[in-house]
Amino acid sequence: MSEVPEGVNFAPASRRSARPTATMTLTRDGPEGVEVLLGKRSITMRAFPNYWAFPGGGVSSVDTAAVEYFSQLEGEEAKTIACILREMSEELGLVPAPTGLTSVPLEARLAIVSDKKNWLPMAQNNAFPVSRENIKVLSHRITPPFGPVQFDNAFLHFHAGSSREVPEIDLEPQTEFTEVMWAKPVEILSKWRSYEMKVAPPVVTLLMEIERTLDRFDRNMENAADDIASRLPGRRSILFAHGVEVVPIKTATLPPADHTNAYMVGDPQGDYVLVDPAVRMREDMESLATAIDRHKGTLVAVVFTHSHGDHLADIGLLREAIDAPIWGSEYTSQSVPCDRILVDGDVLQLGNQSWKVMITPGHHPGHVCLLGDAGLIAGDMVAGIGTILIPPQTGNMNEYIEQLKRLKDAKPHLIFPSHGPVIALPEQTIQRYIDHRSARHQRVLNAVLAGTSSVEDIARTAYEDTPDAHPSLAIDQTLSHLLAHQEEGNLTQKNGIWAAQ
């Protein structure tokens, strides 16, 4: 079954057009070769907190107005170039000029940081240079469908020349980046592969492309950039971490999510497993088959984290493209034939990577997580978008909270959820889940102790702090909390009437 409770209906999800954004790949000639600029994003940022990424942001009305004013900003990419000129002024205090990078005066930068609308009039008054010369569009990429909002990002490039001519970057006026660094692509990728640093997935694949292309052009970055810009982008891997590639699969899951993440987990050059390939449509099966063909390792098994319908595949369709054993927990084997029963503590040796099996019931019996150096394949224990339901029939709220504590104690590097993007701050995220569920658990108990007795009335009281909660889901989850309190001996119920024990 799907985890959406029976009888609960949602309006069909509508996906908006992708929002335009722009990022800048700044390069320079360092003493030992081409270097790239990355900034470490603050932990307060909504997208990719604590990750290293390119400077950039969303295209705004300010950028549209700039295109109308500056005649040199012409063509299809004019708005994204205007956007990146403004974003660089704010985040780095630097702007491209015909002779390289130049600093934005501090007073002007502070004004832009306080209100981005100040950028255009200051540029009009020549407070700093505005030049699109030598800015190239390397590629475009629409973010995967992890949530209802997607972004169409223009990856721009500017080569600043010799490192001796690049001004120092002052981060103090802005709040997005806590650090910046210039480093060779190969050095960044090496630290990413050893889990020493977190790098945004699209940055990883672009750095890989830059490194490959530099080798073909005698390490000349401007020639390499011209070559990258001239090629139509192919289907790219989505690398959440070294050894963790994701393929989103469209499923009938709990909104606002409408996809389930299938993961290729293990050695990129050796053995790997495919987790939750929940394919039900041929188009998704073809996308998955393409990703498998592109992978340089050997697929040794399909693993299902649990037996909800938005995680299991149409086995007949799956078998058309994938001939591999199926592994799952004993409970999952009741829904799909498993060639290997996974038990808590098993270690999956996947080439040069080891992944530990953790059986984490609560959301569903026999739920499987995988823990490795890269992080936690979390299934439905936590989500990158939306919420996690604990079904009253097959879930257990007490077990769920206890297993969350166990996962937090494991201190994963990252969390790879079944729904939504990678979770950058694992311990903080899991603790937030624990606190939220524990607080709701107490509110349910308090409602009964105050004399409320029916599930519907208890739900209304317990969810007073969440007026936007779906009424049917609130009742469903309230029942899960009530059953957990009954298990603990706090409450009793007779003929649907709940009371203190």
Image (cartoon, rainbow, N blue to C red):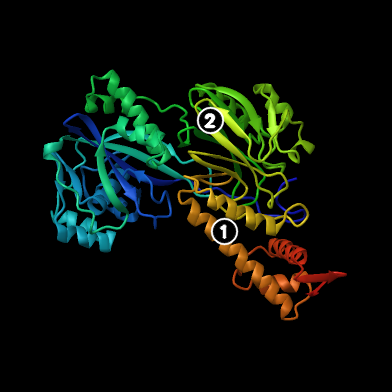
Under mark 1, the amino acid is Tyr
**Residue 90 image point, x, y percent:** 25, 54
**Residue 47 image point, x, y percent:** 43, 51
Task: Determine whether the residue tagged by mark 2 lies in a helix, strand or loop.
Answer: strand
- Note whether 2 is above or below 466 in the view shown: above
Left or right for 263, reference 181: right
Under mark 2, the amino acid is Gly
Q: Residue furthest front?
A: 345
Q: Residue at x 74, y 74 (%)?
A: 457
Task: Determine whether the residue tagged by mark 1 lies in a helix, strand or loop.
Answer: helix
Q: What residue is shown with label 1?
A: 433
**Residue 225 image point, x, y percent:** 27, 28
Closer to us: 483 or 322? 483
Task: Give the number of the disc on residue 266.
Answer: 2
Asked whether disc 1 touches disc 2, contact meaning CB atoms under 8 Å apart, the reply is no
Dot 1 crowding, Cα within 10 Å, few <14, some 14–19, many 20+:
many
Task: Give the number of the disc on residue 272.
Answer: none
Q: Residue furthest right?
A: 495
**Residue 224 seen by the camera:** yes
**Residue 262 seen by the camera:** no
Dot 2 crowding, Cα within 10 Å, few <14, some 14–19, many 20+:
many
**Residue 49 image point, x, y percent:** 40, 51
Q: CA distance from mark 1 to mark 2?
A: 28 Å
